[in-house]
Amino acid sequence: MPKWLLAALLPAVLLAQNAPQTAPRKGPALWEGSWWSSPIVQNMDLSETQRKEIRGTVGQYRGHLLDLREAVQRADNDLEIALNESPVDQRKASDAIERLATARGELTRTLSQMTLRLRTILSNEQWQELQKRQAERRAAPTPPAAPTQPP
């Protein structure tokens, strides 16, 4: 994947990975890591207008993204069920694969569109600074998980 595409999609991917959901899922908590609400944007000189536009854009996409995320989860669950059947019904599994690919494609498209709108809110200098900060964040070692105690 080209570096510029990864950098452009990172905020959107973070949103997708951290979106609130109606069903429990594995992974990080709600909306954590979203660049527009994280310390990563501190001292970036975002104007109040930019903050308002960012919140508005995220708000416009939020419901649709949640629906798309749920569609991906349903399709993923359907595929898992189809693959765990014995014997495997190839037609049913193939249909589940197509639904999953379509759902993921629509989620990616929508996230990319939102990222584009968010990008237009930032100045070129702010965008470059955001890319730099995200790269530093990705390169930083993650602290080890705290050991869990037995029940």
Image: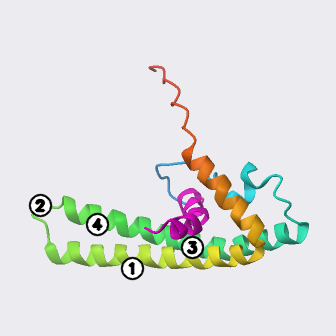
Marks 4/2: CA–CA distance: 13 Å
**Image disc number at residue 102:** 1
Placement of 74 over or under 106, stated as above or below: above
**Residue at mark 4:** 79
Q: Of marks 2 and 1, which one's residue comes earlier in the chain?
A: 2
First to last magenta residue range? 1-20
Q: Of marks 1 and 3, which one's residue comes earlier in the chain?
A: 1
**Residue at mark 3:** 111
Mark 4, secondary structure of its residue: helix
Marks 4/3: CA–CA distance: 23 Å
Residue 78, horizontal then vertical, whole percent: 31, 67
**Image disc number at residue 86:** 2
- What amino acid is found at the position of numbered circle 4 in the picture? Leu
> What is the quadrant of the N terminus in the image?
bottom left
User: Is residue 29 something one can see in this rendering?
Assistant: no
- What amino acid is found at the position of numbered circle 3 in the picture? Leu
Q: Of marks 4 and 2, which one's residue comes earlier in the chain?
A: 4
Marks 1/3: CA–CA distance: 14 Å
Does the magenta portion include 8? yes
Marks 2/3: CA–CA distance: 36 Å
Mark 2, secondary structure of its residue: loop
